[in-house]
């Protein structure tokens, strides 16, 4: 099989009107006037998206002189990926070259087809960051799939030589001084698939053969729940600081989310209460916008990316932590799911629980559901059982969520009208949030049925 180079890169979205200024601030003087070249990349996959589902991307890139066939493998940790490159005749995929890569087993003879095109004008230069060398590129162009097109305006940093930490250090420099850049979490290939597949995005992939550290990184998109599942591996101070930042961001979002849910649930309430509610939503929106545009929030994606890729949790030489990192993910996953499921009582009577306790049970189910979704691909021996069980997790969480939304909404509504001093709004809120025993009974019955289904069979991971 062909050997792979490891690609470690960061992409930053930049506003088109400021792209030249950012490029000029970082490119060496002899590269600032570079004309660059146009690159046209055609991406391929099967009709059922086998490569994308496996976390791979296959393209042929044409720079006007040479055609390069590239297979990018799944993430190997944070922003690192295996990359297989070979010059080919083109314009189609060279199957003999592809046969020497991991894609051959994934495709298993399935036919490939061109899906979308990425065309960018690229300027690039090499900059030093300490003892490391990093290629910095400015890409201006578009991704086009079917009849849809999106603009691309990115600064890309790729580590050529040296320490990955140097790559993140340069990334932090790029984001300083309020430059109009944001870490781009969506690759060009992901953007193309989103266009041709009607809004679907690449999902985090956990695969058989991964170790536990790689699996944790792969499901970092649901990071707070993932961290809870993998917490035995994340005991260092740096991981605690990242957890604190995630908690801060979640709290910044909670107020707006709760008010929006409240507005949707009482669309037919009296206008007096809607006036109070809309004033509260406007004030919350200002606070949220301030949080989202703050230097603290802007720095967070890069901080998380660096932590996932080169964080201390990856480097610890403590025997127990090293063994946990290197443990096969299927073993870890089965034990983690067992632990999550054991926290739930099969005989629980949800109707008898206080509201706050039902809320805690919902959170337990949510963590179990997210873990089961993330690990589902590891356990394919019982697909029907897996489908039934994950559907039960979803139904139980959603039914209990509706009950919790009612309780939270009632509390928020009473607080809003108390603060407003508006008697008419208080009366309207009381009418809108009067208990509805029949509705609550229906929701509890549905939640209890889903709860029973969760325990109706042996877990799909065993």
Image (cartoon, helix red, strand yellow):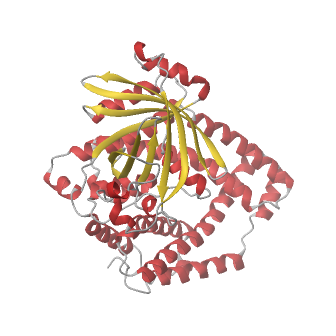
Q: Quadrant of the C terminus?
A: bottom left
Q: Horizontally, is 335 left or right of 341 in the view?
A: left
Q: Is residue 242 left or right of residue 21?
A: left
Indicate the position of residue 215 as horizontal and vertical percent values. Answer: 33, 58
Q: Residue at x 72, y 74 (%)?
A: 436
**Front-most of residues 266 and 238:** 238
Q: Does residue 346 appear in this view?
A: no
Relative to 75, 440 lies left or right:
right
Residue 255 image point, x, y percent: 61, 48
Please say whether residue 234 is visible from this viewpoint: yes
Identify the image quadrant of residue 142.
Answer: top right
Determine whether 365 is above or below 101 in the image.
below
Residue located 50% across and 30% down the image = 295
The extreme front residue here reads: 89
Q: Nearer the viewer, residue 156 or 34?
A: 34
Q: Residue furthest bottom?
A: 456
Q: Position of residue 450 (x, y in %)?
A: 53, 80
Name which quarter of the figure residue 372 lies in: bottom left
């Amino acid at each position: 099989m062909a050997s792979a180079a490891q690609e470690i890169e960061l992409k930053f979205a930049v506003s088109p009107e400021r792209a030249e200024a950012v490029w000029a601030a970082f490119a060496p003087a002899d590269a600032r006037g570079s004309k660059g070249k146009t690159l046209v990349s055609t991406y391929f996959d099967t009709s059922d998206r086998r490569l994308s589902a496996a976390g791979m991307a296959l393209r042929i890139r044409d720079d006007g002189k040479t055609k390069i066939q590239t297979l990018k493998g799944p993430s190997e940790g944070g922003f690192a990926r295996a990359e297989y490159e070979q010059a080919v005749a083109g314009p189609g995929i060279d199957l003999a070259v592809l046969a020497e890569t991991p894609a051959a087993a994934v495709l298993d003879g399935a036919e490939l087809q061109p899906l979308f095109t990425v065309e960018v004008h690229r300027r690039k230069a090499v900059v030093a960051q300490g003892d490391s060398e990093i290629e910095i590129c400015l890409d201006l162009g578009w991704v086009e799939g079917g009849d849809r097109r999106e603009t691309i305006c990115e600064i890309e940093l790729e580590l050529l030589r040296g320490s990955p930490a140097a790559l993140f250090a340069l990334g932090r420099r790029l984001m300083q001084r309020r430059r109009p850049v944001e870490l781009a979490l969506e690759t060009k290939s992901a953007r193309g698939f989103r266009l041709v597949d009607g809004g679907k995005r690449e999902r985090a992939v956990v695969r058989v053969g991964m170790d536990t550290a790689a699996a944790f990184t792969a499901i970092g998109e649901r990071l707070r729940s993932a961290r809870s599942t993998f917490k035995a591996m994340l005991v260092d101070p740096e991981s605690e600081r990242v957890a604190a930042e995630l908690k801060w961001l979640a709290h910044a979002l909670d107020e707006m989310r709760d008010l929006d849910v409240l507005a949707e649930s009482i669309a037919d309430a009296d206008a007096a209460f809607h006036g109070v509610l809309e004033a509260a939503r406007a004030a919350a929106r200002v606070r949220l916008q301030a949080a989202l545009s703050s230097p603290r929030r802007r720095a967070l994606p890069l901080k998380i990316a660096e932590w996932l890729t080169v964080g201390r949790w990856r480097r610890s030489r403590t025997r127990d932590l090293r063994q946990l990192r290197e443990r096969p993910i299927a073993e870890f996953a089965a034990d983690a799911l067992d632990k999550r499921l054991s926290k739930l009582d099969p005989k629980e009577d949800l109707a008898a629980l206080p509201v706050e306790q039902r809320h805690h049970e919902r959170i337990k189910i949510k963590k179990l559901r997210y873990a089961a979704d993330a690990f589902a691909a590891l356990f394919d021996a019982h697909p029907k059982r897996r489908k039934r069980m994950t559907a039960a997790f979803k139904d139980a969480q959603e039914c209990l969520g509706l009950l919790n939304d009612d309780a939270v909404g009632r509390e928020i509504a009473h607080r809003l009208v108390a603060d407003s001093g508006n008697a008419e709004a208080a009366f309207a809120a009381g009418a809108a949030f009067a208990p509805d025993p029949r509705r609550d009974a229906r929701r509890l019955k549905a939640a209890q049925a889903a709860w029973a289904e969760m325990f109706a069979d042996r877990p799909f991971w065993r």
